[in-house]
Amino acid sequence: MEKNLEIISSLCKRRGFIFPSSEIYGGINGFWDYGPLGSELKRNIRDAWWHFMVQWRNDVVGLDATIIMHPRVWEASGHAAGFADPMVDCKDCKKRYRADQLCEEQGKQLIRDGKNLLLPEGVVCTECGSKNLTQPRSFNLMFKTYVGPVEDDSAAAYLRPETAQAIFAEFLNIVATARKQVPFGVAQSGKSFRNEVNPRNYTFRSREFEQMELEFFIRPDEAVELICGKVTTLADNPDLTGEPQEDWGWEVWHRYWVEQRLTWYRLAGLPQEDLHLYWQTKDELAHYARACVDIEYAFPFGVQELEGIAARSDFDLTQHQKYSGKSMQVQDDRLRLACEAMTPEAKEAFKAKVIADWRARGKDALEAAQFVEDLFLGRYIPHVIEPSAGTDRLALALLCNAYDEEHLTDAKGKEDIRTVLRFAPALAPVKVAVLPLVKNKPELRDKAWKLYADLRRHWKCAWDETGAIGRRYRRQDEVGTPFCVTVDFDTLENDTVTIRLRDSMEQIRLPISEIVSYVDKSLTL
């Protein structure tokens, strides 16, 4: 069926998934609150991501860092000077736009003139139709605040625009305490803030949002070559068969994480045909990036990014080394031992090759020589692969994907429409609803309540005793509950219940003692 964002957002408001923030005061653009069911959905997303990316792996650890950090962090990362969007205003109606989005909506592209951006001919204000627009000007997206009682420049700080930089800032502490050797990763999920010029598409582009990010640190290809005698490329292993290997180069690691993240999205319930890979062109890449792939999803408003997976070289740690004065190099004993076994002639030949390669890529020969000398001592700054996902965007994608309207005809020929959210059971906000067949029979209600109390020790459960049983089933369908357990008079006789399945509406009879094992089988991604 064709999905409609207005219908989905209406359901989210009506059933307690998502509310406009501060609605009683007219709301605030770009901010959203997650209600009882929405908060459960997001928690389930975070937990499923953490299990897949951290708990089930031996080469990833976690971090939970502060939202406000030292402002030098953002100078080192480049956010303080360059984290900006081009903004234009309509001089007639005062409507404000992000320039690139305004042009894109009208089938045009911004014109780059040196360091300046210009609007092409024919771009108009979509609010009033005026051509009287300002030229694009830079607008920094970071929210500024002050630490302490005095609001002056010395106390200025920022709400973080991403979670990644804290991982780089804490890299030395993590290496010292986590007992992990490169390659290994550090994961973090949490709030980020970007003062978007034009929040839009419901929760897709917001000013306060959550990210789930991994920084996976790898050896430079030159270190891999010294240790293993070769560097495996995608040409050598195009299908990425088997577990990660020590001789993998950066492009294989990058593709590995693209495939890992695609696998996880499919497990989360997003169909393969709605997931797309967009490989950024050389002109689109950040200056430090060797490659970047966007995993996109076909939302009702178009195909848009869910996650970016970037090969960021050693840029981030190098920048923090430069700005902090602290060495971000790691000591790699495997590398040191391999270099100690080399002859002087082999070392000179390797150095010459690296210098020639760096020169061919427009990099400094003296820096290349120092880099190689450090390698011979077993030292280097790790490179990084960064899968960065949006929790809110994924929640919206799952809501859009799960929404379904099923046309039914009963035994009397009466037609009806069943609204159902077909979440993967592991991500559904409520796993089981317990429904006493009637509420005016104390022994029946007490039996059902005891079962409800037992089951909610395992999962988030719902209790519903109001209305006809069919109507209660429909209420649970609309919020995506995969299992409804009905306690009836037979339950009092033989301790069995009816379990009604959301997707097929099939009903089966099961002993109470088997409910937990039956439901648990479906709750792993």
Image: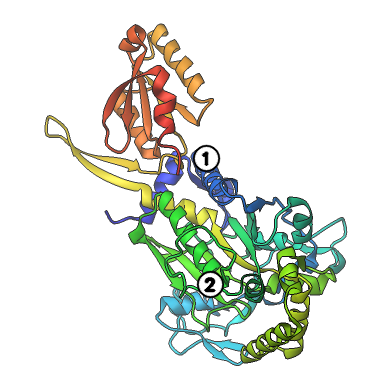
Asked if residue 145 shows in the view, the reply is no
Q: In this view, does 156 lie above or below 524?
A: below
Q: How many neighbours does mark 2 have within 10 angstroms: few (below 14), some (14-19), or many (20 or more)?
A: many
If the image is split into quadrants, where does the C terminus sit?
top left
Q: Is residue 322 above or below residue 108?
A: above
Q: What element carries label 1?
A: helix
Q: How far across and how far down the image is residue 334, in percent? A: 71, 65
Q: How far across and how far down the image is residue 309, in percent? A: 54, 66
The amino acid on which the numbered mark 1 sits, given as a three-letter code, is Glu
| Camera-side residue of 12 and 269 | 269
The disc at residue 40 is: 1
Judged left or right of residue 235, residue 220 is: right
Question: What count of labels does the image hold?
Answer: 2
The disc, 1 or 2, on the residue closer to the chain's N-terminal end is 1
Alpha carbon distance from label 1 to label 2: 42 Å
Whether label 1 touches label 2, CB < 8 Å: no
Q: How far across and how far down the image is residue 495, in percent? A: 37, 12
The disc at residue 98 is: none
Q: Mark 2 points at which residue?
A: 232
The amino acid on which the numbered mark 2 sits, given as a three-letter code, is Thr
| Camera-side residue of 82 and 377 | 377
Q: Residue at point 70% right, 55% down?
A: 180
The part of the image, by quadrant, that contains residue 169 is bottom right
Q: How far across and how far down the image is residue 207, in percent? A: 59, 60
Q: Is mark 2 on a helix, strand or loop?
A: loop
The part of the image, by quadrant, that contains residue 286 is bottom right
Q: Residue at point 70% right, 74% down?
A: 78
Asked if residue 105 shows in the view, the reply is yes
